[in-house]
Image (spheres, rainbow, N blue to C red):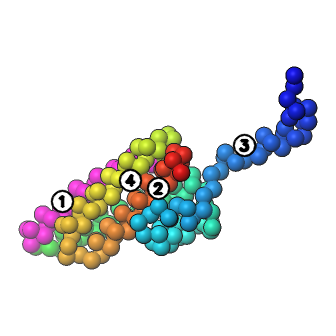
Amino acid sequence: MIHSFAKHPLLLLTLLCFVFSSCSARTVKIGDICSKHNNPSICNAIILSVPGANQGVDIDSVSLYLINMAHVNAFDTITLISEIIGNSSDPQTNQRYSSCTMDYTDVLLALTQAKESYSSGNYGDMNSNGAVVTKDVKDCDTKAYDSSQIRNNNQYLADFSMIIMILADFLAGKY
């Protein structure tokens, strides 16, 4: 027996168009994303800084955009750390910030891997790489106690990382 959808080709076509359009873009409300962040107002501000973001966002495009923005932030921070090292004659300061440079080398690698994980649909690894970023910026934070700019950059990047991990969970279907 033919199902009733098959008897009405226009109804079947409409249903298929709806299914495919629903699957091609996964839109999530910003409030749903940021309610899972430890600082929802910062999360909201970060996501609203994404071009085209409003009440809801396409989590695929926002994920890629935020990974790229986090990468830019990390690169800018490692440049700033290098400037601090270059301007300091104190061996202990240079040692602490050299250690931060190693942390940020790991951050850049983890963000590259997060982007690769996103592209391959491996959202669990995308989440894990976000966690590595958070750990490494917190490690640097303990060493950069005398630079408010580095500490602010670390916090900003930790906030980005948490959003990336939340988005990875949305993409993986955990929410």
Q: Residue at x 73, y 43 (%)?
A: 19
Q: CA distance from mark 1 to mark 4?
A: 20 Å
Earlier in the chain: of badge 1 and badge 4, it is 1
Left or right of residue 98: residue 110: right
Residue type at the position of mark 4: Gly
User: Which residue is the site of mark 2?
Assistant: 166
Earlier in the chain: of badge 1 and badge 3, it is 3
User: Which residue is the site of mark 4?
Assistant: 130
132 in relation to 92, above or below: above
Boundaries of the magenta span = 90-117
User: Which residue is the site of mark 3?
Assistant: 20
Identify the image quadrant of the N terminus: top right
Residue type at the position of mark 1: Ser
Residue 99: which disc?
1
Q: Is residue 117 visible?
A: no
Residue type at the position of mark 3: Phe
63 in relation to 24, above or below: below
Between 31 and 14, the residue placed more toward the observer is 31
